[in-house]
Amino acid sequence: MSTHWLTHDEPFGINALVGLIALSGILMRNTFILLGQVDHNLKEGLAPFDAVVEATVQRARPVILTALAAILAFVPLTHSVFWGTLAYTLIGGTFAGTILTLVFLPAMYTIWFRIVPTSRDEEETGRGPSEPTRVRDGTEVRVSA
């Protein structure tokens, strides 16, 4: 049977697996909180890139505080013979998952939806970075691909 290498050879048994199932629920909740804020920011009229960045900033504190509360709540269980592996799984997974939620999730969201930052000039003219212009006779002409 495999062991937790960070927890001094504690066995990875059924309690640790239960901890992984509980961990998936915690991380999904954090993901829904962040993506819900992105959706709200988009409905408020923010540019897609700004909506993702603002959502991450706006929801960082609630996500970190709930993760910290969960981590601290499981610290007393680490000394338990029966529930120790569950506690270690939830503590380590919540810590790593929170970092992934706040760093990896926004990055993957922007990659998945092909969101790129826009400059102030592009926002004012309504021209995106994929629509270059060429000047002909003193007037701007959009170049289509």
Image (spheres, rainbow, N blue to C red):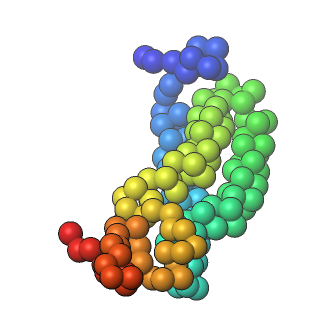
Determine the residue positioned at 79% across, 36% down.
Answer: 76
Determine the residue positioned at 37% across, 62% down.
Answer: 114
Determine the residue positioned at 51% across, 68% down.
Answer: 118
Specify the farthest residue to the left: 145
Which quarter of the picture shows residue 121?
A: bottom right
Specify the farthest residue to the top: 9
Where residue 81 sits in the image (x, y, percent)? 67, 25
Q: Exactly how many numbered labels are in the figure?
A: 0
Which image quadrant: the N terminus? top left
Which quarter of the picture shows residue 111?
A: bottom left
Where residue 130 sits in the image (x, y, percent)? 34, 67
Q: Is residue 107 visible?
A: yes
Vertical side of 99 occupied by 142: above or below:
below
29, 4: nearer the viewer: 29
27 sits to left or right of 112 = right
Which image quadrant: the C terminus? bottom left
Where residue 105 sits in the image (x, y, percent)? 50, 53
121, 42: nearer the viewer: 121
Where residue 49 sits in the image (x, y, percent)? 52, 67
